[in-house]
Amino acid sequence: MLDAFRELIDELLGAPATLRAAGVADTSDPAVLSSLTLVTSRDWALIDRIQTTIRKDVPLLKAPVDPDPAAVSSETVDEFDRARGELVSLLMNLTLKDWERTFIDWNGREISVADDVENHVEFDEDQIDSIVSALQG
């Protein structure tokens, strides 16, 4: 089971290198930067959900808020790196019990930390693929 969690972490760890190799640091494409801002926002939201979930018994969580497109700035890539580093650090320090903890989402569904991270990784992969495609364009 821990191997499956390690694979999720590895997927998240690979994204920054993939983006750097595709030239994300040199782009000013608003669509690319907007997508990266969305991924970053989702990273921070996942961090918040995990921290809340491991601190409380079955918390009821609010829906994540997508970022304002105006939030895109020249520091978008740096902010992504910070968020991804924080997320990976948090995930690497979770216990098996933490991965199994659950919360009630904004739709009334009970979701485990593991399932939430897996959903995030799937979203992340799609977004990173789109960003790389746009950069190679």
Image (cartoon, grey):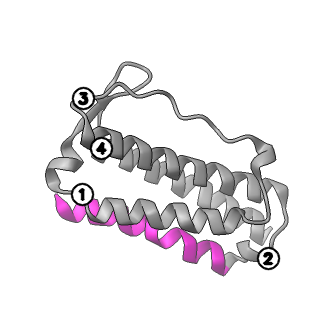
Q: CA distance from mark 1 to mark 4?
A: 10 Å
Q: Residue 29: x and y, percent?
A: 84, 62
> Camera-side residue: 92 or 18?
92
| Residue position marked by numbered label 4 in the rendering | 113
Q: Please give the residue where the numbered disc 2 appears in the rendered image.
A: 26
The verdict on residue 8 being magenta is yes
Task: Note whether 64 is above or below 86 in the view shown.
Answer: above
**Residue 94, which numbered label?**
1
Q: Is residue 98 above or below residue 9?
A: above
Amino acid on which the number 1 mark rests in the picture: Leu
Q: Secondary structure at mark 1?
A: loop
Q: Residues within 10 Å of mark 2 (few under 14, many from 20)?
A: few
* Label 1–label 4 contact, CB within 8 A: yes
Residue visible at 34% across and 23% down?
Answer: 109
Disc sitting over residue 58 in the figure: 3
**Residue stretch in magenta:** 1-21
Q: Position of residue 10 (x, y in %)?
A: 38, 69
